Image: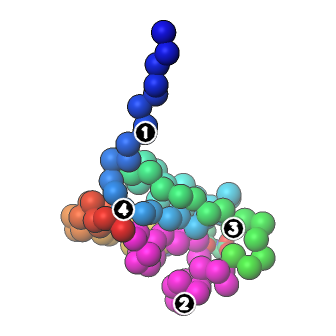
């Protein structure tokens, strides 16, 4: 019998991107929050990328640290900003928005 695997369905439609470094505890916390909500995201690890911050700053000129999170291309900021959004019940609506 042949079975066809069902495609993995993302829980949220938003495009979520997380710029990170591999030693970064704030990155881990941000990713844990997203994962705990069931959100899938694209991680861009800039640990060994000397142009990493330059790439981020094209999208968010004020960024100086990782993580940097973008939801549907909107710069969210770092882990603290992500948690504040969630505490204010503003994160889920962003995740539910289509790109
Ligand atoms: N308040 C920031 C703190 C972020 C932070 O301090 N990140 C550290 C790494 S965990 C950082 O980017 N340090 C400079 C670097 O590693 O390039 C947040 O919540 O995201």
Tag of residue 57 = none
Magenta residues?
53-77
Looking at the image, is mark 3 or mark 4 nearer the viewer? 4
| Residue 46, disc | 3
Q: Is residue 7 left or right of residue 84?
A: right
Residue 5 appears at what percent x and percent y?
46, 27
Q: Secondary structure at mark 2?
A: loop
Query: What residue is pinned by disc 4?
Result: 14
Which image quadrant is residue 19 in? Answer: bottom right
Please state the quadrant of the image where ligand 1 appears.
Answer: bottom right
**Gap between marks 3 and 1, in whole Å?**
27 Å
Residue ID for mark 2: 61
In the rendered structure, the answer to whether residue 65 lies left or right of residue 32 reads right
For residue 8, the mark is 1
Q: Of callouts 4 and 1, which one flags the residue occurring earlier in the amino acid sequence? A: 1
Q: Earlier in the sequence, mark 2 or mark 3?
A: 3
């Amino acid at each position: 019998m042949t079975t066809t695997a069902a495609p993995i369905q993302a829980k949220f439609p938003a495009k979520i991107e997380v710029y990170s470094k591999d030693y970064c505890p704030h990155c881990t916390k941000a990713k844990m929050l997203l994962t705990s909500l069931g959100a899938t995201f694209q991680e861009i690890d800039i640990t060994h990328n000397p142009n990493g911050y330059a790439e981020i700053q094209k999208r968010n000129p004020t960024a100086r640290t990782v993580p940097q999170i973008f939801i549907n291309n909107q710069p969210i900021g770092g882990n603290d900003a992500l948690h504040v959004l969630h505490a204010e019940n503003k994160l889920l609506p962003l995740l539910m928005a289509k790109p």
